[in-house]
Image (cartoon, rainbow, N blue to C red):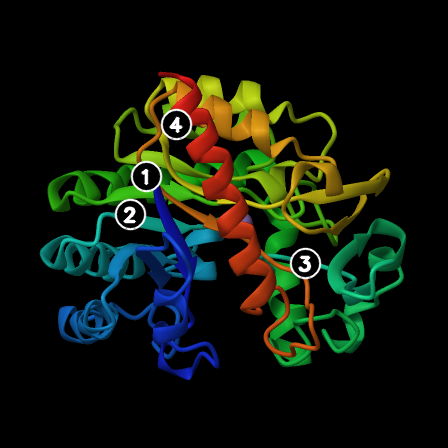
């Protein structure tokens, strides 16, 4: 297991030098954040990022993520050219020896919350989701009411995109994902890069849009779309753990046993009702996810990939990118390493 930490590039308010000081963390999860969606990532740009990470004494463990253009997800004409660009980006990763690519395949919006600063009893704040609050958001007026997405789309563009998805049901969306993977997985194999799809967050349809990477059945279907070790998953305990139907340790044993877990996002959520949850501190006792059992399953299947803490709360007066402050994530990755050390040493 490679303890890792997400870094949003040189614009991140948390410098690599701070990440270097978190005990045990050696891997960095990062991306190029200023390349327009659909363009190829050049080896030169990615190489500069890799050099910055290595100059700080760390290792570029995962690209998270290269966004998949909506035209690919919609199966529109023109997707082949965009898939060509995506393949070029994967080839650049391979040339630089960056081994894992985390990506997602969610329509229009990826992570979605209804509150970015829910106050918890201890005074910290966390991200939260409530399906009733989401239902009250009217997208015909744009995304202004959707936390975290206020400036993501112009209202007219959003309406056009939502209209385009009206003809795309879940099965058609699966077809579009298969079409994409049939073309990029061979490129990844050739490049020595492992693809790791991130589950949908939250793991159910929102705004009438299809969401398909939500549970054990879906993840097993995903890995059989293209039967290659390069076609795997990011096991995100927070995303999958928001649904009580998901037995996370069992899913780890099944997918990990197939050798298809290439990256782990470990965090906790507390389920607060049907399709409702808020994020919490990482330790098992704070939420609905039993991280001890998840990590035990990861150990048992021989997981050796990068693992990062996922969203943290805002604590100790810190401000910053929602979910991505330094303090709570540093506590989280330290806790995860404590579990891992105890599991490893008790096996002797
Ligand atoms: Mn995640």
Q: Describe the element under mark 3 as helix, strand or loop.
A: loop
Looking at the picture, tell me which residue is in the foreground, 284 or 154: 284
Q: Check disc 4: other Cα within 10 Å, few if <14, some if 14-19, many if 20+.
A: some
Looking at the picture, tell me which residue is in the foreground, 174 or 75: 174
Residue 145 sits in which quadrant?
bottom right
The residues bearing labels 2 and 3 have C-alpha atoms spaced at a distance of 24 Å
Give the foreground label among 1 and 4.
1
The residues bearing labels 3 and 4 have C-alpha atoms spaced at a distance of 25 Å
Residue marked by disc 4: 223
Q: Check disc 3: other Cα within 10 Å, few if <14, some if 14-19, many if 20+.
A: some
* Relative height, residue 222 to residue 338 (above, below): above
Of the image marks 1 and 3, the number of the one nearer the N terminus? 3
Relative image position of residue 150 (x, y in whole percent): 69, 78
Q: Check disc 1: other Cα within 10 Å, few if <14, some if 14-19, many if 20+.
A: some
Asked if the residue at tag 3 contacts the one at tag 1, i.e. Cβ–Cβ closer than 8 Å, the answer is no
* Relative height, residue 285 to residue 346 (above, below): below
Q: Describe the element under mark 4 as helix, strand or loop.
A: helix
Q: Residue at x 59, y 74 (%)?
A: 321
The residues bearing labels 1 and 4 have C-alpha atoms spaced at a distance of 17 Å
Instruction: Confirm or reject: label 1 Cβ below 8 Å from ligand 1.
Output: no
Q: Left or right: where does residue 94 sit relative to residue 342? A: left
Residue 324 seen from this side? no
* Relative height, residue 287 to residue 162 (above, below): above
Q: Quadrant location of the C terminus?
A: top left
Residue marked by disc 2: 100
Residue marked by disc 1: 305
Of the image marks 3 and 4, the number of the one nearer the N terminus? 3
Q: Quadrant location of the N terminus?
A: top left
Relative image position of residue 109 (x, y in whole percent): 60, 60
């Amino acid at each position: 297991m490679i303890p890792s930490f997400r870094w949003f590039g040189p614009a991140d308010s948390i410098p690599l030098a701070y990440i270097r000081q978190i005990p045990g963390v050696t891997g960095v999860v990062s991306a190029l954040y200023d390349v327009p969606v659909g363009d190829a990532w050049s080896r030169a740009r990615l190489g500069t990022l890799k050099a910055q990470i290595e100059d700080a004494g760390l290792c570029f463990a995962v690209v998270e993520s290269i966004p998949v253009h909506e035209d690919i997800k919609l199966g529109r004409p023109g997707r082949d050219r965009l898939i060509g660009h995506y393949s070029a980006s994967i080839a650049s990763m391979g040339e630089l020896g960056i081994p894992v690519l985390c990506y997602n395949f969610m329509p229009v919006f990826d992570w979605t919350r209804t509150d970015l600063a829910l106050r918890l009893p201890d005074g910290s704040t966390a991200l939260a989701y409530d399906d009733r609050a989401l239902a009250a958001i009217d997208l015909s007026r744009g995304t202004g009411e959707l936390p975290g997405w206020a400036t993501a789309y112009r209202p007219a563009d959003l309406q056009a995109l939502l209209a385009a998805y009206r003809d795309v049901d879940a099965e058609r969306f699966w077809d579009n994902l298969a079409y994409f993977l049939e073309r990029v997985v061979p490129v990844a194999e050739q490049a020595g890069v492992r693809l790791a799809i991130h589950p949908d967050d939250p793991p159910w349809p929102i705004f009438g849009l299809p969401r398909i990477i939500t549970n054990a059945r879906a993840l097993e279907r995903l890995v059989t779309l293209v039967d290659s070790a390069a076609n795997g998953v990011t096991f995100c305990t927070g995303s999958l753990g928001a649904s009580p139907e998901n037995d996370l340790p069992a899913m780890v044993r099944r997918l990990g046993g197939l050798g298809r877990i290439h990256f782990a996002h470990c965090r906790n959520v507390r389920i607060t009702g049907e399709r409702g949850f808020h994020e919490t501190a990482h330790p098992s006792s704070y939420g609905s996810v039993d991280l001890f059992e998840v990590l035990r399953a990861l150990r048992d299947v021989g997981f050796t990939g990068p693992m990062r803490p996922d969203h943290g709360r805002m604590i100790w007066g810190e401000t910053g990118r929602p979910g991505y402050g330094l303090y709570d994530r540093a506590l989280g990755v330290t806790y995860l390493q404590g579990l891992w050390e105890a599991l490893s040493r008790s096996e002797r």
